[in-house]
Amino acid sequence: MPELLNGRATNGNSNYKETPYSPVLESEYGEYRSLTERMNRRIQSGDPWYSLEFFPPRTANGAVNLVSRIERMSEGGPMFCDITWHPAGDPGNTEKPTSSTCMAATMLNYCGVETMLHITCSNQDEDGLKRNLQKAKDIGLKNLLALRGDPPDGGDTWKKQEEGLNYATDLVKVIRREHGDHFTICVAGYPTGHPESTSYGDDLRHLKEKVDAGADFIITQLFFKPETFFQFLRDCREIGITCPIIPGVLPIQAYQSLRHIVKLSRLEVPKEILDTIEPIKDNDEAIRNFGVEQCFQMCRELLKHEDVHGVHFYTLNREVATIEILRRLGMWVEEPCKPLPWKQTANYVRCKEDVRPIFWRSRPKSYIHRTSNWDEFPNGRWGNSSAASFGDLTDYYLFYLKHKTPKEDLLKMWGEELNSEQDVWDVFHCYISGCPNTKEVKVCSMPWNDEELSPETNLIKEQLEAINKRGVLTINSQPNVNGAPSSDSKVGWGSPNGYIYQKAYLEFFTTKENGIALKKILKNYPQVNYHIVNKNGEEDTNCDLTTPIAVTWGVFPGKEIIQPTVVDPIAFKTWKDEAFELWKHPWGNLYPEGSQSRKIIDHIFDSYYLVNLVDNDFPKDSCLWRIVEQMLEAGRQTSSVEEMDVNGQ
Amino acid sequence: MPELLNGRATNGNSNYKETPYSPVLESEYGEYRSLTERMNRRIQSGDPWYSLEFFPPRTANGAVNLVSRIERMSEGGPMFCDITWHPAGDPGNTEKPTSSTCMAATMLNYCGVETMLHITCSNQDEDGLKRNLQKAKDIGLKNLLALRGDPPDGGDTWKKQEEGLNYATDLVKVIRREHGDHFTICVAGYPTGHPESTSYGDDLRHLKEKVDAGADFIITQLFFKPETFFQFLRDCREIGITCPIIPGVLPIQAYQSLRHIVKLSRLEVPKEILDTIEPIKDNDEAIRNFGVEQCFQMCRELLKHEDVHGVHFYTLNREVATIEILRRLGMWVEEPCKPLPWKQTANYVRCKEDVRPIFWRSRPKSYIHRTSNWDEFPNGRWGNSSAASFGDLTDYYLFYLKHKTPKEDLLKMWGEELNSEQDVWDVFHCYISGCPNTKEVKVCSMPWNDEELSPETNLIKEQLEAINKRGVLTINSQPNVNGAPSSDSKVGWGSPNGYIYQKAYLEFFTTKENGIALKKILKNYPQVNYHIVNKNGEEDTNCDLTTPIAVTWGVFPGKEIIQPTVVDPIAFKTWKDEAFELWKHPWGNLYPEGSQSRKIIDHIFDSYYLVNLVDNDFPKDSCLWRIVEQMLEAGRQTSSVEEMDVNGQ
């Protein structure tokens, strides 16, 4: 009955579009809800969830790719993602891209996904465990999966660790003893029995012990038939296990990996599956198609059961099969809900955060990093938070940004050789327009953008294209919006039936001549707030130096006004340094010292102005384009002499 | 040159209307600025101010009248108002209507005017002074005028107080020593010499001592010719007094009072003035006209001087002459600036307050009183402030509310005898419509309103009239507003060139039958948030119980969004008790126990519902009238039986 499933899922995950108009809504942010609480709410509303499991990558490049994958998959609305504990990979290291804890921190804080970290007994005594628990807490984690883990020496059977911990139950006890209710704790259930356990019955009793020691819910080891799970579920309930028991499922994706997994887990693959895939074992596509169909059918069966409230996917760090199964189940959220115009972190410490300066909009990870030491985050007002100090830029280069694009690719995008400022302007133009550059390479990223252009930039794309080509190098912008529905596909966010507003905003680098001309022109536009600043901090502004300006806000049924984005004069001083620095690193540094290319970038760094403009008159057509046009006109007249100088360099 | 003066004043006090569009404005609230700082800003901008002096009334009724007068006069934009120290009137008593300190507290907190309290040496030793200073600080005062005062025994010359203080200089020293910079201190200057001083020169030296001891500015004793002041000003500057020196002026209002004042102050009235008024001394109107003209001419002369930045008026607690002079000078602010839709207090502790629940809109003094013990006031968000506890209603009846309307007048307005609920409904109808009642008396106040109907009520007056007559007893309402200019005369507030928004709000008492019908009807209006509650707290609502709803907000150039009014479910519980209680006191208690009138009010108190409705869809026509119409229709059908019961009582 796929209709039924689709019906359930539609009433659930994507209910933002489908439920009737109602001003009574649970708040989407502002209050931290534990995973247990969120599960209970979904159980009560009959709205099944899914979760996704990943393992730490072997290399830093692998980590970069995994982070991107998790970001993409988090769009589909998983209840949480979990990352396995890899004892050989220095798992407690918070700085090493390939470590479990570092990956968990990244998922939580930068991908913005509710995260669960596995933690095992392997290779650690109680003191080591305590240190790792503290690290997990420090990075903001609230969920752990407590496992005994694989035998520490890589052997086939567990050898008792004399100084160490030997049972998941001990782990659960230590976590509860040391950290009370801080963590939601998950434990593993084995529907076909743990490979090393003496009997299925003993195994169930161990599971009961883990729950009694303080575990909140159970995820099962993978299995291949729904009946296996149903029998296990009955047996668990029989002996008094009452917490949620979530089936773990594996979409079969390749013959070899299946072999490997069943060997590791010492599982038996049912004969009918083996019979089906043996003949097609060399046809990857056929295997994958089979895997999707088999897993989809099993999930459908599982979710019909009244005591099954979610499904856990062993993704093997792959996305295609899992997403396809979720789509067919109707559980993949096609239009993710955006509680705010920017993506929040999933860190409980920041759950009330709902205001940020607009400057970092295209570099949210830099912003999260630079504010990660704050004790409190602005809620409702930016206000005095502006006095909080931003962390250093220098220690910002997180592994997955540093490794994101290799130097040679950057050179292909931004120019192997620059001959004039116009060459630089053309790079900006290509980025905005999406047109390939003269080497037929698409410019898909810029130093000022962590991510792709936001869809709302399309609303003003033509204007941006035209001015970038002429040396108005835009790095951030938004059109004015006067009461668009909160469901609007480009500018919408927040709960349904709200209204969205924006003041037009434009931020760009431009030549000294343009900057000087602009100062004069702005005298005729008192409705515009502006900052014009060069790298030395010589600044012209008409803003009150301590007053933030709201540039994005929303009005919703049954709520206070939300104003998630502001232009704050104090934060701008910090941003300005970061924005100028990005000319040198990563761009200028691509070229040898003394080269003409390097000189051109240095000249821009030294002489250009960074400008931001806010048109306060949001209900009217924005005057910002007219201002820029007048600036270009006036700048051109004064720059002809200057231009010769630059060419003469 | 009245043109010049008018020009200056227009650029100053009323610049909200006249200056060109500019997003750079000093913030109107949020930051406390000391009187000294505000004076300096006005001096720098060349924008002269005025201040108004009052003395404590002799009777409680006089106090009630004075409070009303100060409220009216504060509308004209004085820099501050001051109240003299009346040693015989228990001046440090904070609860006695006729005491100086109580009056200062009322001016500051309830009239919302920057207040200066005089304080003198008369009848007090240093300990007594310290206690009075602490009281002044506790009620929120920031400004004192330190004077030696009149001789303690009412005699003609000051007799040295052995245990006490004998010089204003000592006062200034004690204030500075005990309270540092907490207070702005003003001292008195005597342009014709202090009556008891040995010489004009000695007097100037004493003044210099007072300034050196820590006084911030000087107000002069009254005088009759500008030259007197100019000479004094020169002499002060000569001996090194650099602080602002403000001329104190007296509009002559009656022959006898002038005689009395000059006798007290031992001043000499110039012959040309005496020659003019002696012949008209029995013609009050002629004297007043002369006084206005003479004072106006003198102020005009004074304000031409580059070192005169303000004028201080000895009002003698009268308003007509002073206001006329200020109007002629162009200094009276005709359209007072409203930083927020409700009037703020002038208490520095509350300077950041910019959010209040809508419920107390017509009873702001009750709200101020019930929140006067709060340490922090909501700014930007109502948020968690809702957890703060409200003070008791029982100790709220401030003198000037208690005495405001005598019982016999209340009976005339609200009915000497009530024969049915319809009689009560008609009282509400008369209040809203402005029509006199059956006894030809205008109903100009109701228990739920401290003040007159707000002008924006006129926008929905017809609808309100119609429904009150039919038993929908409205006590608070506002129309929806979708981006009106902030200068709008009815709904505007805040700095210029902003946009104002409101969600339609309606709050009323109505019969049990109507309330029950309404609950059903509201199922069809999901865009409406509601509370329906009876006196026992039996409540029906579709609101999130911890989430406030913004119902008034504004968007301004260069600022964050301001949302000064919310509907908060938690505060509503407190308000509901106050609102129900107001049926009994003051209304029901007007009638003898057991009387039919009393029974009718009791019946309403016992059985009616208090309802509030918020239409979240502010850009569309409000649906609230349709809802009320449907309620009345449905309520009528079910109430015919019930009605017989009531009549049978």
Image (spheres, coloured by chain):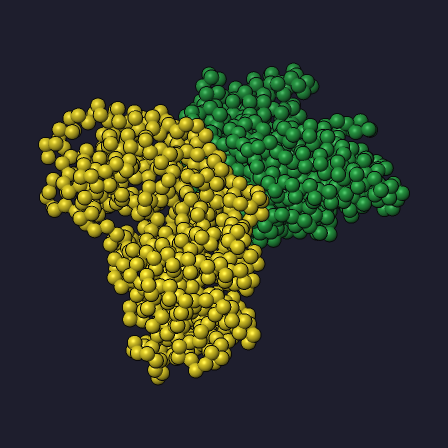
Chain colours: A yellow, B green
The vertical placement of B551 against A517, above or below, is: below
Residue at 65%, 24% in the rendered image: B254
Residue at 49%, 25% in the rendered image: B17
The vertical placement of A345 against A562, above or below, is: below
- Circle count: 0
Q: Is residue B124 visible?
A: no
Is A98 displayed left or right of B127 in the figure? left
Q: Is residue A633 visible?
A: yes
- Where in the figure is residue A618, as x and y percent of width and height? 43, 32
- Where in the figure is residue A230, as x and y percent of width and height? 51, 68
Rendering quarter of residue B118: top right
Along the viewing direction, whichever of A631 and B200 lies nearer the viewer: A631
The vertical placement of B588 against A527, above or below, is: below
Along the viewing direction, whichever of B144 and B277 lies nearer the viewer: B144
Rendering quarter of residue A609: top left
Residue at 46%, 33% in the rendered image: A482
- Where in the figure is residue A535, as x and y percent of width and height? 24, 41
Along the viewing direction, whichever of B204 and A523 lies nearer the viewer: A523
Question: Which residue lies most toward the right here?
Answer: B648
Which image quarter is the C terminus of chain A in?
A: top left
Is A590 displayed left or right of A482 in the figure? left
Is A339 displayed left or right of A63 in the figure? right
Rendering quarter of residue B45: top left
Residue at 47%, 78% in the rendered image: A200
- Where in the figure is residue A57, as x and y percent of width and height? 29, 62
